[in-house]
Structure formats: C-alpha cells, structure tokens
Amino acid sequence: TIKACLFDLDGVIVDTAVYHYKAWKQLANSLGFDFTEHQNEQLKGVSRVRSLQLILGWGGVTKTEAEQEQLATLKNTWYVEMISRMKPDEVLPGAKQFVEDCRNAGLKTALGSASKNSMMILEKINMVNLFDAIIDGNKVSKAKPDPEVFLKGAEAVGVQPNECVVFEDAIAGIEAAIAGGMKSVGIGSADVLGKANLVVSGLSEMTLERLMGL
Ligand code: G16
Ligand code: MG
C-alpha cells in the first residue's frame, strides 16, 4: 500500500525553469556567448555547479574551480532576486490541491529537490506546511539519478521505499525513484518519462484513485 508521496519541486510544484534560464543566460552573455532554451531543458533537475560546468562547456570557456564558485554564486544572486518576487499563483495547476488531497487522505508528503533555494520558493507559494519533510540540495551529497534525496525523504517520514510514490519531471528523477525501489509518476511527456509507472501532463490530472491504482 502507498503511504507517502515524494514531490520534486521545479517542474512539478512550480515552474522556476524560466527564472533559471534568465539568470544563466545573463551569466553566459556576460562571458561572451549565448545560452538557448533548448540547452536550458538539459539542466532540469541538474545541480547548480554541474549546470554551470555544462554551460561553460557549451560556450567553450574554461574556468578554475574558484572562478566557477564565484560564477555560480553570481547566477544564484540573480536567481534569488527573481524568485523573491514569486507570487502564490505561480504554483502549477492542481499542485497545491493534490498535495492537500494526499494529506487529507492520511498520506505523508515530502519534498525531494536538487535546489538549495527550495525553502524560499515554498514560502513564496505558501506551501511549507504541506510537507512532513523537506529534503533539498542542502541535505544531499549525491545528485539524481542517485536515490539519496528520495530515500532520505522516505526515512524522514518513516515510510518504506516500496510504500512511496515519487512525482518527477526529469528522467534522472524517475531513475532515482526506480533505483530507490519506489513507484513513480512522470510529469510531462511519455516519450521522455516512459520508465515511470504513470505519466501525466501535470498534477491537475492526478487523483487519489489513480494514485492508489499504481
Ligand atoms: C532544480 C532545477 C535545476 C537546478 C537545481 C538546483 O531541481 O530543476 O535546474 O539547477 O534545482 O537549483 P538551485 O540553484 O536553486 O540550488 P529540482 O530537483 O527541484 O527539479
Ligand atoms: Mg524537476
């Protein structure tokens, strides 16, 4: 039986990809090259430092580790400035409702995100109190597809991995769920997320009935 739902943040609860895109583009432009939306797609669910390394590679630019740290911090300053202006209506359709439905049904809920800014985002959209545990980039050392973030979430809410369902928009996140012995629901297109037990276009399509049928 399913006892807990573990939610990715960016792409599942909110769409912050557009803010990441603007901040990375500004950074790339300051270094003398451009950054496309297509490239941004490939950074979904990828950690901040790894994202920067990919972008520098696309721009054909080499930077020392110390310089990389400065650039990542600069990008984050711009990103945080943007998300500090986020409004509660930027929650993706159906997301808040479905998390509330899960809780009302007695299920545990946890966040499992690569972002180190997850707390600020949850505060902006008034959802901090809807999660029994918040596991994010500040609490994990291994990035998805490693299952660490979701295993820590399961442990924090006292539920076995095989009693958890993970909601993810990135293929690496679905792979992390599978590696952790959990069920998964892909948010997006079945072409990309076909390994998930179920694929929906958004949480507005999810119901408790569909959840319990997994
Ligand atoms: C998110 C985004 C990624 C971002 C990462 C780290 O992951 O999808 O694009 O690079 O967090 O974010 P930050 O720079 O805020 O620490 P997720 O796991 O929530 O989809
Ligand atoms: Mg995501």
Image (cartoon, helix red, strand yellow):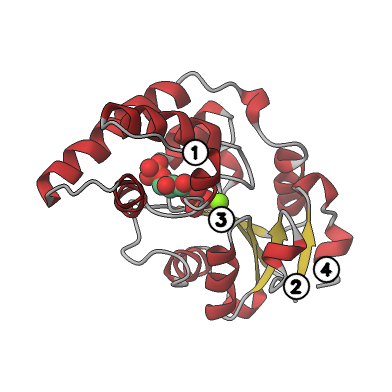
Callout 3 amino acid: Ala
Q: Secondary structure at mark 3?
A: strand
Callout 4 amino acid: Met
Residue 101 placement (x, y as % from top left): 78, 48
Q: Which residue is mark 1?
A: 36
The extreme right residue here reads 209
Residue at 13 percent across and 42 percent down: it is 67
- Gap between marks 2 and 3, in whole Å? 19 Å
Residue 31 placement (x, y as % from top left): 26, 32
Callout 1 amino acid: Thr
Q: Which residue is mark 3?
A: 110
Is disc 4's CB within 8 Å of ligand 2?
A: no
- Gap between marks 2 and 1, in whole Å? 31 Å
Residue 203, visible in the rendered structure: yes
- Gap between marks 4 and 1, in whole Å? 40 Å
- Gap between marks 2 and 4, in whole Å? 12 Å
Mark linked to residue 19: none
